Image (cartoon, rainbow, N blue to C red):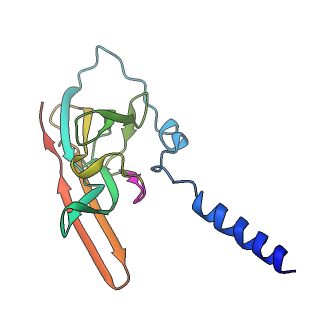
Amino acid sequence: MKKISLLILFILIFFSCNEQKEMSSINPENWSKRTANLNEKDSLEFGKSYLSIYSQIYSISEHKTHNLIAMVSLRNTSDLDTIYILKAEYFDTHGKSVRNYFEKPIYLAPLETAEIIIDEVDTIGGTGSNFIFEWKIPKNCSEPLFEGIMNSTMGQQGLSFITQGVRVK
C-alpha cells in the first residue's frame, strides 16, 4: 500500500510540473466572422497606429519581473461609419514580430469594440512589447482608438494601468 501511495504521489507531482503554458487568446473564429473584402481602388483613408503593451514589468529590481495580463482594445469611435482593421501585429521587446492576429481585413461597426487578450503566462513580448495596427476609414470619419489595459492581482494586491495608441502614419 505504501508503494502505491508513493507511486500516486510521484505521478501527481510529475504531471503538475509538466503543466502546459497557455498562449494568448487567439481564436481565429472571432476574426473570420468579421472578415471584410476591400477593393484596392476604394476611397478609404489609410492609417497606421502604434500601441505599447507590457506583458511584464520590473519589480524590486531589473532582475525580477512581474507578469501581467493585457487586454488590447480596438475601438471604432465613429457612431456612423464602419471602419476596417487591416493588420494587428504583435512585436516583442526587441522589435521581432511575434504574431499577426488575422490574415484578412476585419470590420468594426459604428461604436463597436474588438479585443485581443494576452494571457498573464504569455511573456514572449517581454517588458517592451507593442502592436502595429494598420487601418482604413471613410473620409471625414474619426480615427480608431487602440488601448492597452494591463493588470494583475495577487492575494490582496492589484496592479492596473492603461496605454493609448498613437498614429504613426
In depth, the one of 22 and 139 nearer the eye is: 22
Queried whether the magenta region covers residue 29, the answer comes back as no
- Residue with the most extreme right position: 1
Q: Is residue 66 above or below residue 28?
A: below
**Which span of residues is magenta-colored?**
116-121
Report the residue that reaches farthest toward the bottom: 156
Q: Could you tell me residue 103's position as x and y percent?
A: 43, 28
Q: Nearer the viewer, residue 139 or 94?
A: 94
Residue visible at 47% across and 39% down?
Answer: 31
Image-quadrant location for residue 18: bottom right
Q: Nearer the viewer, residue 56 or 160?
A: 56
Percent x, y for residue 117?
A: 40, 53
Quadrant for residue 86, please give it: top left
Q: Position of residue 168 (x, y in %)?
A: 12, 34
Q: Is residue 85 visible?
A: no
User: Is residue 81 toward the left or the right of residue 16 in the image?
Assistant: left
**Residue 41 visible in the shown view:** yes
- In this rendering, the answer to whether 148 lies above or below 76 is below
Judge by depth and name the residue closer to the eye, 109 or 126. Answer: 126
